[in-house]
Amino acid sequence: MLELMYKLMEYRSHEIRHRLEKVGRAASMLHMDVLLLIYHFARFGPGNILEIGPYIGGSTIAAAFGVRDSGTPKKIVSIEAGGRLEHFRIPSRHIFKDLKKNLARFGVLENVNLINGRSFEETTISTVRQTLGSGEVGLFIFDADNNARRDLDCYGDLLSDRCWLVIDDYFGPAKAAPLRAQVDELVSAGRLVPFGYYGWGTWIGQWRRVALTATQ
């Protein structure tokens, strides 16, 4: 946990921060520290990346930058239902269209497998499983609704042991309460290992394929 904090401090004065500041201004509601951590996990973590709820692409671009800088081929699968959102800073009348536009703007569109659909729909599940196999995902990003447990139940077998998880809105708006309850329950059950809260309430931790016991 301390090593992660030290690494984040290093990134704050690194060139990647300046690149991600441009991304944040154009395409993200996540705190800069969270974008930096996504970049770090994508760059140095083993395995592919599964993202649910990228909105218009800030987190996806951060992950794609990390994969590119890693020099290692990794798949990025990002699921977005689309629609529109009224937001005081970065609203969107056509979320999926703006997502593709931003990925193209920052030069990573060809590096991402985009799925326009809901994560729990059979067609989406089938498409994801055609791309990602069991235990292949090293980074899971969730920033959709208030039901992270649903998607972890659905895709948990694709996550590697100690897969990094980035779950937004653990603290914050109305949807935070049920989301926080789900995360806390999984922590208590030994399936999630917390590494802290970053930015404006984003939960960072790891997945355990087999639940930790009290002696572990």
Image (tube, rainbow, N blue to C red):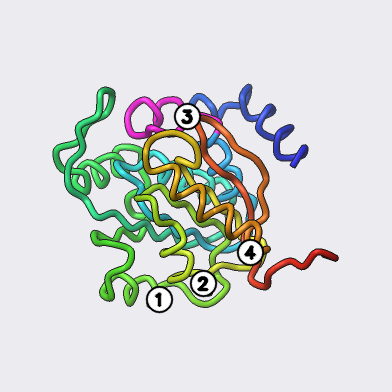
Q: x%, y% of residue 159?
A: 55, 67
Q: Are marks 4 and 2 in contact (CB under 8 Å)?
A: no
- Reading the chain from its start, which is encountered first: label 3 or label 1? 3
Give the structural element (helix, strand or loop) at label 3. Answer: helix
Q: x%, y% of residue 175?
A: 38, 43
Give the structural element (helix, strand or loop) at label 2. Answer: helix
In the rendered structure, the answer to whether residue 118 lies left or right of residue 59 reads left
Which quadrant of the structure image shows residue 52?
bottom left
> To which residue does mark 1 refer?
129
Crowd rating for badge 1 (residues with CA inside 10 Å; few <14, some 14–19, many 20+): few
Q: Comparing marks 4 and 2, which lies closer to the viewer?
A: 4
**First to last magenta residue range:** 20-33
Residue at image location 39% in from the left, 38% down from the top: 58
> To which residue does mark 3 refer?
19
Which quadrant of the structure image shows residue 76?
bottom left
In this view, which residue lies farthest toward the left? 93
Mark number, residue 158? 2
Along the line of sight, which residue is nearer the eye, 75 or 161?
A: 161
Along the line of sight, which residue is nearer the eye, 34 or 49?
A: 34
The CA span between labels 2 and 1 is: 8 Å
Q: Comparing marks 3 and 4, which lies closer to the viewer?
A: 4
- Reading the chain from its start, which is encountered first: label 2 or label 1? 1
Q: Comparing marks 3 and 1, which lies closer to the viewer?
A: 1
Along the line of sight, which residue is nearer the eye, 137 or 102?
A: 137
> To which residue does mark 4 refer?
191
